[in-house]
Image (spheres, grey):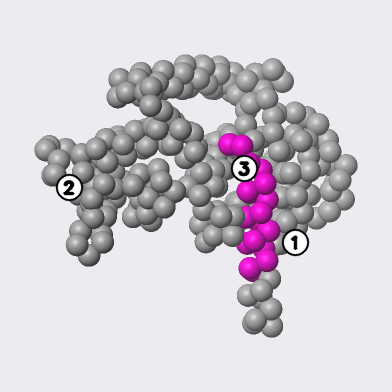
Amino acid sequence: MTKVSGPVPAVLTVGQVAEQFDVTVRTLHHYDEIGLLVPNERTSAGYRLYNSKDITRLQHVVVYRRLGFALQEIALLLDDPTADLGGHLRRQREAVMSRLDEMRDLVTAIDQALEKEMSGIKLTKEEQKELFGDGFSDDYADEAKQRWGDTKGYQESQRRAAEYTKDQWQQIKADSVANTVELAAAMNDGEPATSERAMAAAEQHRVLIEKWFNPVPYPMHKGMSDMYVTDPRFTKTYEDIAPGLAQYVRDAIHANADRAAAVAGEHS
């Protein structure tokens, strides 16, 4: 879980804690500011010092974060007067085991898909939904064709998609998941949608679409993001990952596009 090994010093500086637990100093400062992890000691100059009690609390924070808990949820769990160390560990173990069961089901679905791919058998709609989630639907493709079928962007996207191999589709999926995870992490870490981190992730979102499918000018990107909060199907996709994520992604994309427009205006 961490890089900590051997006996832990009586107190650690914020830099030492950041290195050993693989978190940023900025994250630790944020935890302090919101009251999630307030170090019990300070130097004479006011610098943070973390004792063994603080380290134990941070260990729980790191585990809960990796399990997908929001910071507010973690605070409630850790500050529960009825909870003890054993209770936290049991709760964390149950959550991990639940994730393992989900991963085993997903591995089974992937193995079945690979077996059919190798034998040249096309996946059924039920198997596609099992592999790609409940959000999979032919309706999206039909609607996209009706809306943008005559545009060059749509035609370019269809041409490129038709040429991709199985490995390339797996990479597209991995890129998309990584981008969504970063956006969710930025939100859960308390970064505003207008922050550099959020806008960088929004820009990566746009770049990935251009990389794999078709050019996406900033105004078009903003229009796409509006659907994340106006179309319940798109909203659910993000909300199932983290409550509020659909609005957060939309706002980050708008902020990134507005920044790009402002920069372009300065150089025109």
Tell me the mark number nearer the camera, choosing from 2 and 3: 2
Q: Amino acid at mark 1?
A: Pro
Decide: few, some or many residues near mark 1? Use Cα within 10 Å; few <14, some 14-19, many ≥20: some
Q: Which mark is on residue 245?
A: 3
* Local SS, label 2: loop
Is there any visible trace of residue 107 in the rendered image? no
Disc 1 target residue = 219
Residue 112 at x, y percent in the picture = 55, 17
Decide: few, some or many residues near mark 2? Use Cα within 10 Å; few <14, some 14-19, many ≥20: many
Is the C terminus in the top left, top right, bottom left or bottom right quadrant? Answer: bottom right
- Distance from disc 2 to disc 1, alpha carbons, whole Å, reads 51 Å
Question: Is 234 rendered above or below residue 189?
Answer: above
Q: Residue at x 64, y 82 (%)?
A: 267
* Local SS, label 3: helix
Lower sequence index among marks 2 and 3:
2
Q: Which mark is on residue 11?
A: 2
Q: Residue at x 61, y 37 (%)?
A: 243
- From which residue to which does the magenta span run? 242-260
Magenta portion: prevailing SS class: helix
Q: Is residue 219 left or right of residue 178?
A: right
* Local SS, label 1: helix
Q: Amino acid at mark 3?
A: Leu
Decide: few, some or many residues near mark 3? Use Cα within 10 Å; few <14, some 14-19, many ≥20: many
Q: Name the quadrant containing residue 153.
A: bottom right
Residue 183 at x, y percent in the picture = 55, 47
Q: Residue at x 64, y 35 (%)?
A: 239
Lower sequence index among marks 3 and 1:
1
- Distance from disc 2 to disc 3, alpha carbons, whole Å, reads 37 Å
Is the N terminus in the top left, top right, bottom left or bottom right quadrant? Answer: top left
